[in-house]
Amino acid sequence: MASPRVRAEFAYEGRFGGPPRGFVAAPGRLVVLGEHVDATGGPVLALPLRRGVTCAWGPRPDRSVRIVALDAKAGDRFVLGAYAKSGRRWADLVRGVCAALEAEGVRLPGIDLVVAGDLPARRGLGSSGAFLTAVVKAFDAARGDEPTPPSTVADVVTEAERTWGGNVAAPLDAYVAAVGAPGRPLLVDPARRTHEGLPWPDGVEAVPIDTGVHPTRAETPWAERKAELAEGLKRLAHAREAARATGGGPDDARLLDRVPEPFVRRARHVVTEARRVAEGAQALRRGDAVALGRLLDESHRSLARDFQSSTPALDALVAARRAEPGVLGARLHGFGWGGCLLVLREVRPDAPTTDDAGGGPDGGPGDPAS
C-alpha cells in the first residue's frame, strides 16, 4: 500500500481540485515501560513509532473546515465557531479539538484536510492521539504562527476525547505525538507535560506484535481495575501518612503489606512499574539492551499477577515470543486483555518490523483501546 502521504496527496487533489499547501504528520507510540503508571501521574518510557497519521492541508477563504478521513472512508464539513455533534465519533473528535483550541484563545482559519494513516486501531498504539495531534499541527501550519505548545496539544486532545468522544484519555498519546521523533525514546512526565530524550541501543528494536484479540475497554474489567488501583493507592497513601506520624520511613514495599487484597496487587504493580521506568531510563542511557529486556519481562509478570490484565492465552503468546532467538524481553502492551505484545529483539534483516502490528491502516476513526 502507498504511504499515508502519497494517499493523502492523491486524495486531496481529487477531492479539492488542486495540490495541498503542505503536509504534517504525527507518530503513534509504544509504552516501553510504565503501563498504567501515567494514569496516576507517574513517568513513562515511550517510543514514538515510524507509523502514524499524515494530514494534507490547504487554506480556505472562509471559516469552513472540510475534512476527508481516508481510513474512515468518510468526510465532514462544519463551520468554525458553530460546534455541534454530528453523531460520528471521529468527526466529533475533530470538532471537539477545534472547539477546545478556540476556547484557549486560538483563532483558527478555514482549512481543507485529507487525513491518512498506517497505524492500526485497537492495538494500544496511540492512533487516536496521533490523529488529533496531526489535525492540530495542520491548523498550526495554516495559521503560519508558532506551533501550539505540546502541553496545550495534550490538554485540548484530552478535553476533546472526554467531552466529544466520551473517552477518558490520558494526555500521554497526544504529548508524544506532538514532540516525538520516530525511533527516539522519551522519558515523559505526563503530569508536568515535560520529557527527556534518551538514546536507543544499537542493534535492537522494539516491535509491536498483534495478538489477534482487540477488545474495547467496555468489554474488559478495565473499569474495575482502575477503581481498584485508585483505592489501593489511596490506602497506600494513608499508610505512608501513618508511618510518618510514628517516625517511620516511606518504604512502599513494606507499607504495601498494610493494603488488603485486591487493592494491594494493583498498587504494587504501579509502585514496581514506576521503579522499572527509572531503571529502564538508566539502561537506555548506558546502552544496556539486556537490562531493558529483563525489565520488560518483569513488567509482564507484574501485569499478569498484580494488575491481572493478561490471560493464560496471552501469557502463552508472550512466552512463545520470548523463546525466539534474539528476543531480549517481551510483555503485553496497552491497557490489557489483548491488543499487542511488545517484543524487544535483536535486529534481524529478514524479520518483519512494525507490520507485525497487523490489521488495516486506521488513522481516522480513533483508537478507543489506546
Image: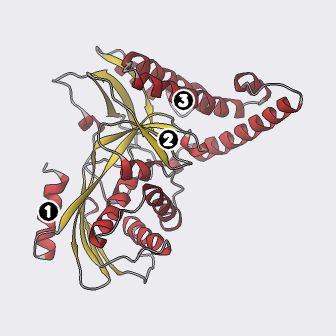
- 12 left or right of 71 in image: left
Q: Residue furthest right?
A: 246
**Quarter residue 212 falls in:** top left
Q: Amino acid at mark 1?
A: Glu
The residue wearing badge 2 is 335
Q: Amino acid at mark 2?
A: Phe
- Give how far across and how far down residue 34 sits, in percent: 51, 35
Mark pair 2, 3: CA separation = 10 Å
Q: 10 Å neighbourhood of mark 3: few (<14), some, or many (≥20)?
A: many
Residue at screen point 40% across, 62% down: 148
Q: Secondary structure at mark 3?
A: helix
Q: Secondary structure at mark 1?
A: helix
Question: Is tag 2's residue or tag 3's residue first in the polypeptide sequence?
Answer: 3
Question: Is tag 2's residue or tag 1's residue first in the polypeptide sequence?
Answer: 1
- 216 left or right of 8 in image: right
The tag on residue 303 is: 3
Q: Nearer the viewer, residue 230 or 193?
A: 193
| Residue mark closest to the camera, 1 vs 3 | 1
- 330 left or right of 274 in image: left
Residue at screen point 39% across, 33% down: 198
Mark pair 2, 1: CA separation = 34 Å
